Amino acid sequence: MSLDLQQAARRALSLIDLTLLGERAAHADVVRLAASAATPHGAPAALCIWPECIGTARGELDGHGLSAVRIASVANFPDGSADARRAVRETADGIAAGADEVDLVLPYRALLAGETDMVRGLLRDCREAAGARCLKVILETGELGSAAMIAEASRIALEAGADFLKTSTGKAAVGATPQAAQIMLAAIARHGSGGFKAAGGIRRVTEVLPYLELADALFGPGWATPARFRIGASALLQDVLAVLDGLGETPGSDGY
């Protein structure tokens, strides 16, 4: 059965990773982001921020009574460098700063060039650096392009120990698409474990619907919980709250 907007909005709120990854993110921006997580309808899953913002974000969240909201850092972001030492260092730095999760960009250009062993090695090293913390691997599906490459990247990431597959950084021309999501979710089903995160260009509840419906169709309606399913966005929150307040969708919104 298809979801209506209210159902989708209620589910989406708990799945959102509120994201602040602009180049000029300031202390005041982090304070506002944390405050926005305190909604009358419940809290999002996490904040996704730069490592240097983690201390501020944790303090602000705790001050709002949101200690259960997780904090995700980023590594090898947004370019997906083939520099393994950099990727490992940034992963470790995020964990040391207090991140519960790390969103790591897969070196997708190296994968496109056929350097699969290097890609596997970088991911495994970052998996080790993350320890028991959640590791989300960003495939940058819009740059990988073909279904075959998205499937290969998904398989390699899961075999290297990724806890989640994430579509995009939000910085590429093409962000999340249902077509890429279907390939990634199928890879998770074949692997037998793993979560999924849609990110890049999702701003409205109507745009969340196809991702939830894909997950429900493949795994059942109880699968897409914050432990297995996330939506990377900030602009989406405004629309979710408008729907839950009975105002319908917002006229428009900007941002990642």
Image: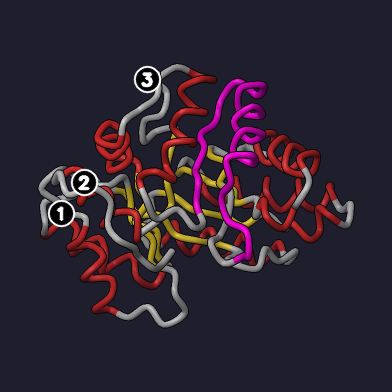
- Residue at the right extreme, as displayed: 114
Question: What is the three-letter code of the residue carrying label 3?
Answer: Gly
Q: Amino acid at mark 2?
A: Ala
Disc 1 to disc 3, how far (Cα)? 25 Å
Rendered image quadrant of residue 147: top right
Residue lying at 26% horizontally and 48% vertically, measured from the top left:
240
Circle 3 packing at 10 Å, graded few (<14), some (14-19), many (20+), is few
* Residue closer to the observer: 225 or 107: 225
Name the residue nearer the viewer: 236 or 49. 236
Q: Is residue 183 above or below residue 97?
A: above
Task: Measure the C-alpha gap from mark 2 to mark 1.
Answer: 6 Å
- Residue at numbered disc 3: 222
Mark 1 residue type: Ala
Magenta region, residue range: 172-199
Residue at disc 3, secondary structure = loop
- Element under disc 2: loop
Q: Left or right of 131: which side holds 70?
A: left
Task: Give the alpha-carbon distance from disc 2 to disc 3, as whole Å.
Answer: 19 Å
The reply, left or right, for residue 186 in relation to residue 120 is left
Residue 225 locus on image (x, y percent): 36, 30
Residue topped by disc 1: 38
Q: Please name the residue that numbered disc 2 is placed on.
A: 43
Residue 173 part of the magenta segment = yes
Residue 43 lies left or right of residue 87; in this view the side is left
Question: Neighbour class for label 2 at 10 Å: few (<14), some, many (≥20)?
Answer: some
Please tell me in which quadrant of the rendered image residue 88 appears: bottom right
Q: In the image, is residue 20 part of the stretch drawn in magenta?
A: no
- Badges 2 and 1: C-beta atoms under 8 Å apart? yes
> For this rendering, which residue is in front, 62 or 152?
152
Q: Residue at x 44, y 32 (%)?
A: 212
